[in-house]
Image (spheres, helix red, strand yellow):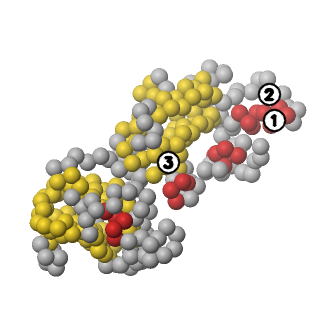
Amino acid sequence: MFHYGTEDDFGGVWFNLLPAGQKRLSYYAVKKAYGADTSRDNTPPVISSLAVEGDAAKVEAGRDLTLAVRATDPDGDAISYQVLGSTMYLDKDKRLIPLPATDLGGGRLRLTAPDRPGVWKVYVKATDGKGNVGIETRSVRVVPPAVNGTDVALGRPATASSYQTGGGDCPCTPANAVDGKADTRWAADWSDPQWLQVDLGASTSFTHVQLVWEAAYAKAYTIQTSDDGSGWRTVREVTDGNGGVDDFDVSGTGRYVRVHGTARGTGYGYSLYEFGVYRR
């Protein structure tokens, strides 16, 4: 056990005796070990179990997620809950992100699953209003929402304005965005504009598009279709993109479909895990 501050992040929430200034059970254990009388102290709630209702290995982005918490307070204090998330396993960001939750009673907390696919750490803090906190965590794997219909872009030839040839998990070729795999991606150069297009082989009607962004996402982009790969029609325009999973119904027909990025959401390029074009 060691204590290096009051940081309330991925590591601090476990190592610190006072994360965010709140006292954990370990604080009172150290206090007692140093000879103080703790017999009259008000101590933190104890979380004896935390479970994800349903399948924690397959939680759809943006859908309801329910946590079942079993907690008691040694002093009989009323318990309130806070839910936080960490993307440490996705991008090494150690911050804890508040995830608004509704207390359904009986220790059940309902929240909206994060929009960004990958493994998240979900934390529950149980507080007693006296400056004490009990903490427990579980891992959940967030996946893109299932789409009704056939992905007509799956496995089709794809091209792009550019792609990264090396470094990290690259080469990140255009084909990676239409291979049906959640751990391969297309990544473009770090400049605007950039595009990725898929050849459906023949003029095809489609009704839905799903974009699964890596951390490098598009803030502004259009979805376009073409009969010949040169003249383009816009079927959807986005000006306020925030990454994660973009799902929308569209009405389009053409042999070629492309994502045309005009403004990056980060200092990096554009990067897509999957570009799905669906016909229902």
Q: Nearer the viewer, residue 126 or 92?
A: 92
Do the residues under discs 2 and 1 have CB atoms within 8 angstroms? yes
Do the residues under discs 3 and 2 have CB atoms within 8 angstroms? no
Against 263, residue 251 (above or below) is above
Q: Position of residue 67 (x, y in %)?
A: 47, 33
Q: Nearer the viewer, residue 1 or 25?
A: 1
Q: Position of residue 15 (x, y in %)?
A: 70, 46
**Amino acid on which the number 1 mark rests in the picture:** Lys
Of the numbered discs 2 and 1, the one sitting upstream in the chain is: 1
Q: Which residue is mark 1?
A: 31
Against 68, residue 202 (above or below) is below
Q: Is 35 placed left or right of 247 in the picture?
A: right
Can residue 236 be seen by looking at this rendering? yes
Q: Residue at x 26, y 48 (%)?
A: 147
Q: Secondary structure at mark 1?
A: helix
Q: Residue at x 38, y 71 (%)?
A: 173
**Amino acid on which the number 3 mark rests in the picture:** Trp
- What distance separates the C-alpha of mark 3 from that of mark 2? 36 Å
Q: Secondary structure at mark 2?
A: loop
Q: Residue at x 65, y 50 (%)?
A: 11
Q: Quadrant of the N terminus?
A: top right
Q: Which residue is mark 2?
A: 38
Can residue 103 be seen by looking at this rendering? no
Q: Position of residue 181 (x, y in %)?
A: 38, 57
Against 108, residue 264 (above or below) is below
- What distance separates the C-alpha of mark 3 from that of mark 1? 33 Å
